[in-house]
Amino acid sequence: MKFTGIGLYTFHEAAQLTKIPVRDLRRWLEGYSYRHTTHDELVSVPPLWETELADNDLNGISFHDLLEIRFVQAFRQHGVSLQTIRLASRLARELFSTPYPFTSRRFQTDGRTIFASAIEETGETELLDLVKRQYAFRKVIEPSLYRGIEFNQDDIATRWYPTQRSKVVVLDPEIAFGKPIVTHGAVRTSILYDAFVTERDAVVVAKLFEVPATAVEAAVAFEESLLG
């Protein structure tokens, strides 16, 4: 498989970028097993979807998996079970004809109906009120989840600007395997950060890498936010 345009993130990197624990990321995207206490048998739970790198030996996820998993976290924070999320994802994939439906802008308008169907099918009726009320559903699918994502004409996410109200740092799967870069000069933020730690001067680092000093400052701030 060619990885250009797909992006590649270790689970540790994905956890830093999404603020989701590695353990949850692995459970959701790799599946897990548990022992059924009643029948004393091992039960295997499949991943929520097959990731773009599932057929490779690489221990990580793609750009689109990274964006999609942020929505799973939002659903889980509102008490939606993995069973319902898995079913809603499948229904939405079929309806939208896209492997990553939660990230699709169509989900903002049609997602409520999809989740209502999934909840009714799984029997989690206590969540129906949350989903059926438009205002409540919008609290789950917050605009912030879509903010910073750029889409192409086919409604496929192409870039993600992770810093609110800023386009200085971007994740673009076409560049540097999707690792965070500064938009001016396409230098990885981690490289600028390491140089700044050594030089302690944004202007000096800017001259070394031929990028604006403001880009260096933004890169440092972004990298420090990943450490928090």
Image (cartoon, helix red, strand yellow):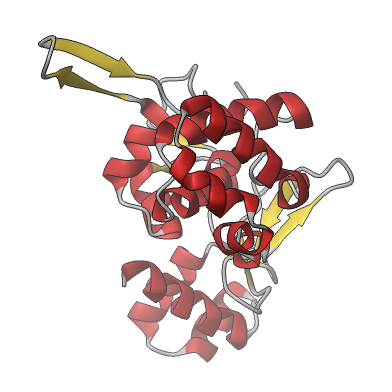
Which quadrant would residue 226 be assigned to in this image?
A: bottom left
Between residues 128 and 8, which one lies in front from this camera angle?
Answer: 128
Say above or below: 121 vs 209: above
Question: In which quadrant of the rendered image does the N terminus lie?
Answer: top right
Say above or below: 185 vs 109: below
Which quadrant would residue 147 be assigned to in this image?
A: bottom right
The answer to whether residue 4 is visible is: no
Question: In which quadrant of the rendered image does the C terminus lie?
Answer: bottom left
Residue at horizontal 60%, vertical 60%?
Answer: 145
Say above or below: 34 vs 177: above
Residue at horizontal 52%, vertical 23%?
Answer: 50
Between residues 52 and 92, which one lies in front from this camera angle?
Answer: 92
Residue at horizontal 37%, vertical 27%?
Answer: 30
The answer to whether residue 1 is visible is: yes
Horizontal side of 190 relative to 162 (left or right) equals: left
Name the spot of residue 6 as percent of width and height, x first. 63, 36
Name the spot of residue 138 as percent of width and height, x first. 63, 61
Name the spot of residue 141 as percent of width and height, x first. 60, 57
Between residues 108 and 115, which one lies in front from this camera angle?
Answer: 115
Horizontal side of 30 relative to 179 (left or right) equals: left
Between residues 81 and 116, which one lies in front from this camera angle?
Answer: 116
Tally of numbered tags? 0
Residue at horizontal 57%, vertical 44%?
Answer: 68
